[in-house]
């Protein structure tokens, strides 16, 4: 039987997504050290890119659940020397209970999923970052209740986080306004598949109106460092400021997956201000990851 993978939020039904959020909220408050549903199980974590939150939350989650996690850098395993993905997926999955990958190419994760005998988790690719959305949505539900029917505004690059917000809008049934320079729009296919949920704007002010949540991310993602200067020019009118928050609803929240560049994509006043829940969402990575591991492995 094919194992259940988590590569995109579209792998979840809306009921499953909501159940994961509620389970993560329970796990956050109920820290029973004797609850060890993954005792003796091992998670392999393959990181082609840097990570603080994803690495620590998965490793800590496995430890708290009685299991363990292996940190694998492609530089140190044969994968980095060209061992085929298909062979690597078969071998690694024959020894561990779950594999989490953070890669440049999304196809690397889907190929692993094709040949793995255990669940594959997408810990971020150039295309998607679904784990962050579990944590962000948990933070929204904690502060404001269900997000169905609400309006979220994404400001900035049409990147992996933006794509995952588009998918979340489909699964959880909210409206997503996107303010983005035309050259950096999200992938058309992902937008087209979310018809009715997504509206694209050229100005942050127009996109922020009536919004319940403002979200942004870095202008240059991992792997795009060489484009930093060019992107600073392209995105200069797409910064989240106090004015953006004032245009949004008075109880609007602010989120950013972190790491953030203060006074670039968001002013320090906003990210460190009273509407920001970035550190709640960051902490939620642990609780959401535990709920996800339990969902896939138990
Ligand atoms: N938000 C997020 O995925 O953080 P890391 O890159 O530190 O894992
Ligand atoms: N868009 C960012 C997210 C980091 C968590 C990146 O891919 O670098």
Image (cartoon, helix red, strand yellow):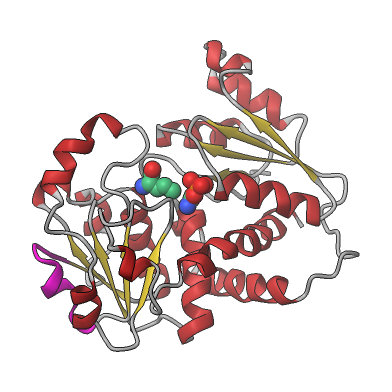
- The percent coordinates of residue 25 (x first, y second) are 64, 75
Q: Which residues are magenta?
A: 200-210
**Viewer-proximal residue among 14 and 282:** 282
Quadrant of residue 125 within the rendered picture = top left
Using the image, determine if residue 238 lies above or below residue 208. Answer: above
Task: Indicate left or right for 10 with 206 as reference.
Answer: right
Direction bottom: furthest residue: 250
- The percent coordinates of residue 211 (x first, y second) are 26, 80
Q: Residue at x 54, y 10 (%)?
A: 81
- The percent coordinates of residue 203 (x first, y second) are 10, 66
The answer to whether residue 170 is visible is: no
Using the image, determine if residue 259 lies above or below residue 221. Answer: below
Using the image, determine if residue 43 lies above or below residue 287. Answer: above
Q: Residue at x 11, y 53 (%)?
A: 181
Is residue 288 on the magenta stretch? no
- The percent coordinates of residue 78 (x first, y second) are 61, 14
Q: Residue at x 25, y 29 (%)?
A: 226
Is residue 201 on the magenta stretch? yes
Q: Residue at x 33, y 63 (%)?
A: 268
């Amino acid at each position: 039987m094919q194992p259940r993978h988590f590569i995109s939020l579209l792998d979840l039904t809306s009921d499953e997504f909501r159940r994961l959020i509620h389970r993560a909220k329970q796990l956050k408050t109920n820290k029973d050290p004797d609850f060890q549903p993954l005792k003796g199980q091992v998670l392999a974590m393959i990181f082609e890119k840097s990570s603080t939150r994803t690495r620590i939350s998965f490793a800590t989650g496995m430890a708290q659940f009685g299991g363990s996690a292996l940190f694998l850098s492609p530089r140190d395993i044969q994968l980095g020397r060209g061992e085929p993905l298909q062979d690597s997926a078969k071998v690694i999955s024959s020894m561990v209970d779950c594999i989490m990958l953070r890669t440049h190419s999304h196809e690397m994760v889907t190929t692993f999923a094709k040949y793995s005998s255990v669940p594959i988790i997408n810990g971020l690719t150039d295309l998607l970052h679904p784990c962050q959305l579990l944590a962000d949505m948990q933070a929204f539900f904690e502060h404001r209740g269900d997000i169905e029917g609400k309006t979220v505004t994404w400001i900035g690059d049409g990147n992996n986080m933006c794509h995952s917000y588009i998918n979340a809008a489909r699964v959880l049934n909210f409206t997503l306004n996107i303010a983005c320079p035309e050259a950096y729009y999200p992938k058309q296919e992902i937008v087209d598949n979310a018809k009715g949920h997504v509206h694209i704007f050229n100005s942050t002010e127009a996109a922020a109106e009536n919004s319940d949540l403002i979200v942004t991310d870095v202008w240059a993602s991992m792997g795009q460092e060489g484009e930093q200067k060019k992107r600073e020019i392209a995105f200069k009118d797409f910064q989240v400021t106090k004015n953006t928050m004032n245009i949004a609803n008075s109880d609007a929240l602010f989120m950013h997956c972190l790491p953030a560049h203060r006074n670039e994509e968001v002013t320090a006043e906003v990210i460190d201000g009273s509407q920001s829940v970035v550190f709640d969402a960051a902490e939620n990575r642990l609780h959401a990851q535990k709920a996800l591991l339990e969902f896939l492995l138990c």
